[in-house]
Image: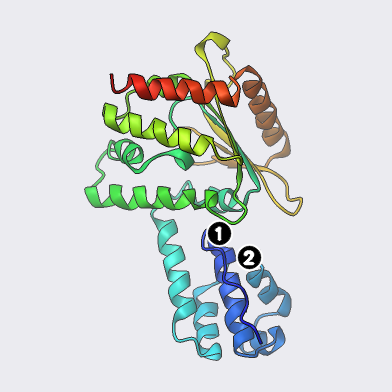
Amino acid sequence: MHAPSEPDPYESPRIQFGTELRKFRLLAGFTQQKLCIPLHISISHLSMIENGHRAPTLELARGADHLLNTGSALTALLDRLNRAATQLPLWFRPWLEFEREAEALRIWGPLLVHGLLQTEDYARAILSREPDVTVEQVEERVAARMDRQNILKRLTPTMLWIVLDEGVLHRPIASPEVMKGQFEHLLEVGENLRVSLQIIPYKACSAVGLLGGFVVAEMPRSAAPVAYIDSQSTEDRVTDRPEEVKGLAFKHDVIRADALSRHESLGMIKEMARRWTT
């Protein structure tokens, strides 16, 4: 029997765990029924975990390790995946799985380069300005932000439709060297065919969306879209209310209509990278 193909390491944690669990189960010669009985779960429950549709528990991981004779492989994997999530703010964690599993993300950024496109130095400059944050916390949060960008490295990367305000290119977040590095990174990412990066210029005189950024996630398997809304509040940033999500998607279309083309946008970013070092 051939071993199942290796999981894509850049998939969501639930999918990573489910893929590994299924691989170990098949290698041990267990059917789903043979494994679920001693774990005291239904076949449908186990199937949902293996397909990444349901989050596993630590108790299940330990039980599977024991039954499949895998040492602590599944327990360690679940612990690592959980620890990665704990580096993110509590209010952001509900959004993390939607971001990871989305087929496409429609992003509007009026103030900063979006986290999925930030360099380590740019992210560090932002996160280090938080009140009472320690150096260790900053580095952990930078690492967690970089980990989020793995959705762009998957076998089938998430499609990104990103619009940034021109002011993002002028705002001095860090030193000229860091800003130049950030814009060079934008140019590199902007060449990716699954990333549509556009700039809405000052001359568009657009006021739509200036109250704050947002992201609309288009989910797979015909699931309803979900949105994340930037605000100073630490609650109610994620919404699946149809009218609200539909309104944000429409607003993103309006903003994109006023934006420069991809070619013109990359030209503006290239020029700003030059200006930051002259």
- In this rendered view, identify the residue nearer to me: 268 or 126: 268
Classify residue 207 by image quadrant.
top right
**Mark 2 secondary-structure assignment:** loop
* Separation of marks 1 and 2 at Cα, in angstroms: 8 Å
Residue 176 in the image: above or below residue 145:
above
Other residues around mark 1 within 10 Å, as few (<14) / some (14–19) / many (≥20): many
Q: Residue at x 30, y 36 (%)?
A: 125
- In this rendered view, identify the residue nearer to me: 144 or 189: 189
Res 157 visible: yes
Q: Residue at x 58, y 77 (%)?
A: 21
**Mark 1 secondary-structure assignment:** loop
Classify residue 242 by image quadrant.
top right
Q: Residue at x 56, y 52 (%)?
A: 100
As drawn, is 201 to the left or to the right of 225?
Answer: left
Q: Amino acid at mark 1?
A: Ser
How far across and how far down the image is residue 36, in percent?
A: 66, 84
Res 88 visible: no
Residue 267, numbered label: none
How far across and how far down the image is residue 37, in percent?
A: 67, 88
Q: Residue furthest right?
A: 222
Q: Residue at x 56, y 54 (%)?
A: 97
Name the residue carrying label 2. Answer: 52
Q: Amino acid at mark 2?
A: Gly
Residue 55 in the image: above or below residue 36:
above
Name the residue carrying label 1. Answer: 12
Tell me whether circle 1 and circle 2 mark residues in contact (CB < 8 Å): yes
